[in-house]
Image (cartoon, helix red, strand yellow):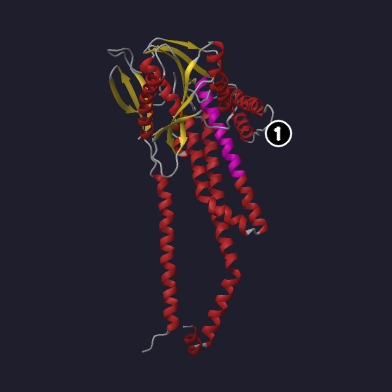
Amino acid sequence: MLLQFAEQSPWSFLLFMLMWFVFIFFFQEIQLLRYLGNIGRFVAHLSTILNSSMHTVMSRLEQSRKDDVAKSAIEERLRRLVEFAIITPTTLEPTGLVSKLKNIILEYGRMLEREVSSIMVDDRARIQNYATAVSVLREMNWFYKVIDHYYRQARKYKNYFLVIQLSSLLPILKELSDIMNDAVNSFLKGVPIGDSAGPLVAFLFSRRNCGDRRVYENVEDTHISECSWEGRKVFVVKAKGPGSTVGRLDDAIRFVVDTLGAKPRYIVTVDAALRLESEQTGAISEGIGVAMGGIGVEKFNIETIASRYGIPLYAFLIKMKEQEALTAMNRQIYTAVNDVVKKVESFVLSNVGVGDSVIIVGVGNTVGVAQ
Amino acid sequence: MSIDPYAVFVMGLALVLLSLLVLYSAMWRKGENQRVQQTQRLVTVVQCGKDIRIRNYMEGDYVGKTVGDECDEGSPMVIGIYRE
């Protein structure tokens, strides 16, 4: 065909060859511009949803503000909280790292709640929900800043490989940003989210089987109940709802074992678990160990208690996507929760003898789930 | 009448580019639609004894909340809230 061009019109041939060389030498630049355009649009989209979420949280806080708190003070405080930094302890010397991390996490939670409660009317559950929404907003802000940082660096240095990496991650980053945006709304509403599956199992188990129960309020933000069911002593542990909190489950188990002197035959944990693409939402799996996400502080402490007293650990996992874990619970997860309650009942009847005791732990955020 | 091969080449190239553009925008729209499908209707599951009914979610509902009047077996209680 090239020869045909050359025969018919040498200008066409020259034009074709010129285009060919332009593409060879400038292809990367053209690609770079296209990818940078995509990333730039995504960064602008992120900025829009961040501002929109910020506005939503602000208007909710304004609706529930104390009479003596000015609107401008809310905005100033929200911006300060969104920029708040959590400095993790150094890992140069790992001794005592878990307790240091726990100290920092607990202090962050307390500080956030204190700040939100100072501008809102006194309603603990709502304060906890709004504090979590502010925390998600903080994560969103950090997420936006990091992506914007790499976008600017890539543009500044015309770094093709940085652009390619960002561009290939765009669909995942977009999904993450949408998850955070939806999570803010779910926490503001105070409805159970996918991650509330564990506390919901604990609630339903107690409601079905523990008519007469003894409640212990000794551990902050955590509900511990003790009841007798089918001749077994059952301790049900969950975060104290319906406000958004994950409670202090490790302290609760320590309280049951050390203070109440229980010698449980099993510690059974129920939690939401991220599913793989090939798995179905609401699929249930069982296993050995502590079913618990997060940074691992509570998990470490529960494992330590269990190994010190030689208590076997059993787990039930309800599979879901990250988006489903952080947004309003869907029907498949709710159905799975009811199935897990039956499975836990059956497990206790088959593996815990009459007269023995068992601890059932509903792991997760208890937003929208009381006790 | 002879057909200019250059014109055929340019036309062919234009057609290929156009179809690629259509394919690209269709794929992009598919990705956008996946998010729109997540429209949610929240429902509240209320239990009264053995009777379980489902109603629309109302602001302030939470699992464990006692709602409405007493029923035959105690008070009706919210035992679930989920998205349909």
Name the residue beneath numbered marker 1: A90
Q: Is residue A279 above or below residue A102?
A: below
* Camera-nearest residue between A240 and A266: A266
Q: Residue at x 45, y 12 (%)?
A: A226
Q: Residue at x 72, y 32 (%)?
A: A93
Q: Is residue A320 above or below residue A10?
A: above
Magenta-colored stretch includes residue B35: no
Q: Residues within 10 Å of mark 1 (few under 14, many from 20)?
A: few
* Camera-nearest residue between B30 and A325: A325
Residue extent of the magenta highlight: A122-145
Residue A61 in percent (x, y) is at 54, 28
On screen, residue A99 versus residue A258, left or right, reads right
Residue A256 in percent (x, y) is at 52, 14
Q: Main secondary structure of the magenta part?
A: helix
Q: Can residue A140 be seen in this snapshot?
A: yes
Give the structural element (helix, strand or loop) at label 1: loop
The three-letter amino acid code for the residue at tag 1 is Thr
Number of marks present in the image shown: 1
* Camera-nearest residue between A232 and A110: A232
Disc 1: which chain?
A: A
Q: Can residue A220 be seen in this snapshot?
A: no
Q: Residue at x 51, y 38 (%)?
A: A180
Magenta-colored stretch includes residue A138: yes
Quarter of the rendering occupied by the C terminus of chain A: top left
Residue A331 in percent (x, y) is at 36, 33
Q: Is residue A24 above or below residue B2?
A: above
